[in-house]
Amino acid sequence: MKNITVIFAIACLILISGCKKNNMNENPFLVAYQTPFGVPPFDKIDTTDYMPAFIEGMKQEKEDIDRIVNNTEAPDFENTIYAFDRKGNLLKNVSKVFDNLNSANTNDQMQAIARNVSPLLSKHRDDIYLNEKLFARIKAVYEKRSEMKLDSQQLRVTEKFYNDFVRRGANLDPAHKDQLRELNAELSLLSLEFGENLLAETNKNFKLVIEDSADLDGLPQSVIDAGAEAAANAGIKGWVYTLSKPSMIPFMQYAKKRNLREKIYRGYFMRGNNGNANDNNEIVAKIVNLRAKKARLLGYQSYADYVIEENMAKTPANVYDFLRKLWKPALPMSVKEVAAMQKIIDREGGQFKLQPWDWWYYAEIVRKEKYDLDDAELRPYFSLDRVRNGMFMVAGKLYGITFTKRYDLPVYEKEVETYEVKEADGTSLGILYLDYFPRDGKGAGAWCTDFRSAVWEKGKRIDPIASIVCNFTKPTANTPALLNWDEVTTLFHEFGHGLHALFTQGNYYRTAGDVPNDFVELPSQVMENWAGDPDVLRAYAKHYKTGEPIPETLIAKIQKSGLFNQGFETVEYIAASILDMDIHSVRDSLQISVGGFEKQSMDKIGLIEEILPRYRSTYFSHIFDGGYAAGYYVYIWAAVLDADAFSAFKESGNIYNPELAARFRKYCLAESGNNDGMIQYQKFRGKEPSVEPLLIRRGLK
Ligand SMILES: [Zn+2]
């Protein structure tokens, strides 16, 4: 089936590029962009332009590779490493525009192009990384690197490229190369199967159907309405709640019927473990064993060793040490939370012991009693314009940069805003696109991406074009867009990624701004600290009608709400991280069932029975079909960094401390790709990060 699609796609492509040939120069990707700042000419791009540009892009990149391989001069930095870094410009340009718009503004045509082009691109990449002559040249430079008088960045990019090839098996003998190719193919199929099973288990195989309105007891009207709508969509009478979190969590928070909470939660945590056609146990075992085999083939003790070598943490032992430091105080905190909730159960005459499916319900009661933070009360102080101006102000105070709205740049949708970002002295830094609201063709969530990344070329910096995409509350006829607290911190978060992109400095695409997975969320998460700082709130959170600053009582509530349910949040997250680490530390193969392994792993750390790991093996999508294998820990690793980084500002007595800001910008943002993440962080901080600030922030100390 797959092959037929590919052949069919190639046939179409030849046709498309064939008939377009005479007016190739009309394809906007095939000529230099004639736009201010060289932004993509969105107004001139037609969906039919992508495929021919992809095909031409792959052809040009192959020619670039051939030029390197066929060079008769001895391999050196310029003719091999630098040339490899600069390959495939057209393919890079068209991929960036296409991928970004396929996420932010897609349609059936775009999705069809994505399906057709993705097998072509993956074959194209394999052809590059398995090209033995190309690797021989890169290896020749790598082996002579210390005699070649390279500067530190030339050395770094040489080592990075060499490593990329080796980690893909370029140093193996032909028989082992074949074995690796087979393993990779098998693994990618298994991941696909895992994901398909999980999708069926989440969306198809379970529904909580309610026919008797008495069973809705406790649910707010909005949750009842959502259940009725889901039922209508499914053609069922009554109310339906599914295992998707926006449907399940509110049900768990408010439903008074305990047996129904148990039913939906069981549906959730048994996914992939029901012994039906969509059972994932066997697939998980196969993936774990094949990954262990792959790691051995490449010369590592375990898959975790293979993955973490590239990260700040460097070794699995360091990750375990780190997770244990957080686990120790978090576990007793979760026990206290259980006790507080048990008190409520006893007070209400419940006569039962708290179970995992009771957690959300009683936590919600605790939240109301202790932390009451009302969404409707907050929103008027967080109109989108004020929040955006607030984050621009913070960046201005920290880094002296300015944001000028532009009305002359092409955009892919009318509502998208564009800003020119400049240094204090007026030097251009780059362009920022802001795309705030949900649309039919936009994926869920929020993200930051770029249409062009920063790099120096012939003494001139190519300015980056960053883009932030969100799904925020829309304005209505009478009110501007009024954000909730989660949306406010999301905007600051994505803006942090944007600043990282805008500040990046470097001579090579491969290394400029390139940071390990456990560093990536530092630039973003650190900005959330400013969003919620009382002094900053006083400056930007003003009533959209009256301009009155946010009341001190609300500031206090925002501060306090950060402590809610943190024992649970930390414990369920770390339990899943440890499960991920344990399962990818298997050296040979799993000796017991997946369920048995999981139980051993959780018993070892003493997880309490009222909490399950955030993801259990059979539905742990991050690690079995999501690219986070032996890497689920990275979120909290970065949280330690961001809390530690912000504490430096706090301790200095000035949250805008210009000297600290300059150091953070230089080492953690602009030059983040120049050296190992930990080295860059220590250049900013003057010491290793400490877990204390995160423990304090979460109320664990
Ligand atoms: Zn992020």
Image: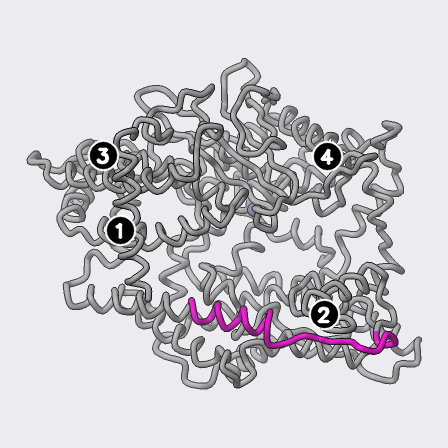
Q: Amino acid at mark 1?
A: Ala
- Does residue 456 appear to the left or right of 247 in the view shown? left
The one of 52 and 496 positioned closer to us in this rendering: 52
Q: Position of residue 503 (x, y in %)?
A: 49, 29
Whether disc 2's CB lies below 8 Å from ligand 1 is answered no
Which labelled disc corresponds to residue 384? 4
Residue 163 seen from this side? no
Q: Is residue 641 above or below residue 255?
A: above
Magenta-drawn stretch contains 285: no
Q: CA distance from mark 3 to mark 2?
A: 55 Å
Outermost residue, front side: 19
Q: Choose the circle earlier in sequence order: 4 or 1.
A: 1
Q: Choose the circle earlier in sequence order: 4 or 2.
A: 2
Q: Residue at x 37, y 35 (%)?
A: 93
Q: Residues within 10 Å of mark 2 (few under 14, many from 20)?
A: many
- Does residue 254 appear to the left or right of 667 in the view shown? right
Per the image, the residue denoted by label 2 is: 241
Nearest-to-viewer mark from 3 and 2: 2
Nearest-to-viewer mark from 1 and 2: 1
Which labelled disc corresponds to residue 83? 3
Q: Position of residue 438 (x, y in %)?
A: 64, 44
Q: Which residues are magenta?
A: 192-215
Q: Amino acid at mark 2?
A: Tyr
Q: Is residue 536 above or below residue 422?
A: below
Q: Quadrant of the N terminus?
A: bottom left
Q: Residues within 10 Å of mark 3 (few under 14, many from 20)?
A: some
